[in-house]
Amino acid sequence: MFLLKRSLFLLLLCFTYQSYAQISDFAHKDFKKADSIAQAYKDEGLQNLTELSRKLTSNLDTDVERFRAIYKWVCNNISNDYNLYLRNKHKRDRFKNDSLKLKNWNDEFRKKLFKKLLKQQKTICTGYAYLVSELSRLADIKCDIVQGYGRVSTTDIEKLTLPNHSWNAVWLNSKWYLCDPTWASGIPDPETNRFTFYYNDGFFLAKPELFAVNHFPLENKYWLIDESKIPTFKNFKASPIIYGNAYKNLELHIAPNQMHKDIRKFENITFEYKLKDNIKTENVRFLIDNGSSQLKVKPNSISIKDKLLKIEFQFKYSGFYDVHLYIADELISTYTFDVKG
Amino acid sequence: MKTQLTLTQRQSFKALSFVLFMMLTSLNFSSVYGQTTNEVASSERTIKGVVTDGKTPLESVNVIQKGTRNGTVTNKAGEFTFPKKLKTGDVLIFSYLGYVDQEIEIKEDTTFITLELSEDLIEMIGALDTGKPYKSKRKN
């Protein structure tokens, strides 16, 4: 009887747990099992998506773990085709004022892309987002493709007129979450430009406020932030540049909220971030580029309290500077300053 | 103390029997439902078909019986013969990367399926994160 009572209690507990689920629940989730399942099916092709989705998810108990296995599999098995990306970008820029030609190109390119994805497991953003969404749907998990603007260090902000990036929003425990499988999967080798798998966990169920610094969705419902905080496109384009490593190290990017600032000599500039984990202050440094040389600089004051990193800095000489923030040896963000005398 | 225990025991027994009752009821429902479809269904038969994109045959389209793991793929000519005999009311799901999935219910007179899959009209885009440090353009 005692056992029966206990199981009833557990049953009740399950319901309570589900109805109060929040993002912090996932913080305690161990994704080892999901990750090892994704690893075990590494050589599985895309010929049978239904079967692939079943293999990845059938031995996992929760939707978040099932989604994790799918997401991780896509990130670790699909490579980003840099040439394909360049060709598409070139054509889209060329046809941007001719809607018929742009549509024809899109139709032709889509066919090519899906063939390449199926046969060579190579693609560009939308292919990643499509696959994550498709495999999730087959596992009965609601997952949308989000189309919009993505901003990286090489984006020519003046020419950013057509949407250039796709990512995912996933519905887990009655809430939407964001992730970016393309940027999580790897980066091109700086020397050879060949794509290299390098999984970045920071893009998995990322914090929407951080995501908003370099993701601008076409549909407002995918911001997942307070409506008053949604930036205009103009403000979005003026945001600081954050890199993949920012997602690994930061919880929030607080200040400065603009990429560029005109300032005076000895004017105080404050940088503020919420960190994921506490770090040592000696691991924080700036790399400052004045156009002709680069200098490693220890900021005037660095403080870390309750994972809140605060940096104060002043320029002694006038000039135009690119300021890169590094934590340990990882590039986090970039700002520019025009310092006048 | 003893009476108290019996009381809680009795209470939990009541709750448990209620759960059991609900479970049995739901089980009952599905079995009743299963029976009716069986009655309507005519004999099991082999289903064949062909899948195209409207112009050309589609190879490697997944054909799966809904709710099961029974399935096959189309050949070069877009044709398939479903490996398991199906009955009226069964549903086949056709899926292919880049195309919208379609579900086809087996009707009483279905033996051959001619299907046209339509493309998923999604715009393909992609921005690459190179991780390269930003560099200001300077007029020197």
Image (tube, coloured by chain):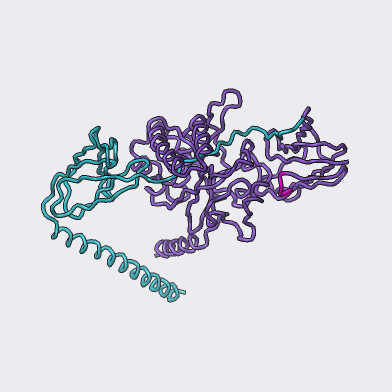
Taking A3 as reference, is B135 above or below it?
A: above
Q: Nearer the viewer, residue A58 or B105?
A: B105
Residue B103 location in percent, x, y? 28, 51
Q: Is residue A69 visible?
A: no
Chain A painted colour: purple
What span is in magenta?
Answer: A255-259
Q: What colour has chain B? A: cyan
Please identify the quarter of the rendering in which residue A159 is found. Answer: top right
Q: Position of residue B122 (x, y in %)?
A: 43, 45
> Residue drawn at (21%, 41%), measured in percent from left and top?
B50
Residue A261 visible in the picture: yes
Q: Is residue B76 left or right of residue A147?
A: left
**Which residue is located at x 36 percent, y 72 percent?**
B14
Question: Furthest residue to the left?
Answer: B43
Magenta region, main secondary structure: loop
User: A252 left or right of A296?
Assistant: left
In the image, what residue occupies the spot 63% across and 54% down?
A232
- Where is residue A28? Give x, y as percent: 56, 50
Residue B3 lies in magenta, yes or no? no
Say which of B31 and A242 sits in front. Answer: A242
What percent of the width, then of the height, locates residue A121?
A: 42, 32
| Quarter that holds the N terminus of chain A | bottom left
